[in-house]
Amino acid sequence: MRGLSLLGIAVGLAALISLSTGRAAAEGTPNKCGCYKDSAGTCFCAKKGKCGCPGDCEPKGCEEQRDKEIQKEIDAETKKAEASQNKRSAGDQDGDNGDNGAKAEREPARPARAARPKLSPAQAKQLAKLIDLYLVDHPDARGKAIEDVRSDMR
């Protein structure tokens, strides 16, 4: 009788061990964010899971956090571009050129070719980012000339 109870305990332990190893095998290995997918494709994350696995299994809220960071970058780039534009437009308003504003009605005043400031590499990179962001929202503008896009934005 005692042998049967020991046998029962051994079988019970073996069942528990096989269940726990089977669950671990079904869970898979966690990625660098501390998350894993089960066989059904459901994402599970550790309590201390962290963001950094875009397109993979990661904790809730990571996508929203990334969207907020991108929006902050866009806002900062837009502020820089507006400040730069304001500086240039303030420099263009030096006085009357004697044509009673006739040319201003036809075409906005532009600084002379030699007087135009050259974009720094950082400004060129910012401009490229802004253009890419604009084209994502306005794919029909890809075939337009820059002057047409600029006039559409006013």
Image: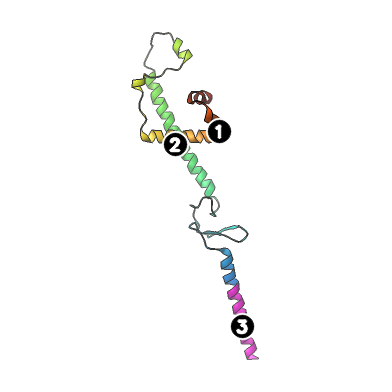
What residue appears at the point 62 percent right and 79 percent down from the top-left corner? 12
> Which of 88 and 42 lies nearest the eye of the viewer?
42
> Which of 141 and 153 lies nearest the eye of the viewer?
141
Seen in the picture, residue 38 relative to 6 is either above or below; the reply is above
Q: Position of residue 122 (x, y in %)?
A: 38, 36
Seen in the picture, residue 81 relative to 63 is either above or below; the reply is above
Q: Which residues are magenta?
A: 1-18
Mark 2 or 1, closer to the camera: 1
Quarter of the image that includes the N terminus:
bottom right
SS for callout 1: helix
SS for callout 3: helix
Q: Position of residue 69 (x, y in %)?
A: 48, 43
How many numbered marks appear?
Answer: 3
Q: Which residue is mark 2?
A: 76
Q: Is residue 15 magenta?
A: yes
Left or right of 19, for residue 99: left
Left or right of 54, for residue 121: left
Mark sitting earlier along the chain (2/1): 2
Q: Which residue is mark 3?
A: 9
Question: In the rendered image, which quarter is residue 91 located in?
Answer: top left
Label 3 Cα neighbours within 10 Å, binned few <14 / some 14-19 / many ≥20:
few
Res 23 label: none
Q: Position of residue 118 (x, y in %)?
A: 35, 28
Q: Which residue is mark 1?
A: 139
Seen from this angle, which residue lies furthest front? Answer: 143
Mark sitting earlier along the chain (3/1): 3
Label 2 Cα neighbours within 10 Å, binned few <14 / some 14-19 / many ≥20:
few
Residue type, label 3: Ile
Seen in the picture, residue 11 relative to 52 is either above or below; the reply is below
Residue type, label 1: Pro
What residue appears at the point 52 percent right and 43 percent down from the top-left corner? 67
Question: In the rendered image, which quarter is residue 26 located in?
Answer: bottom right
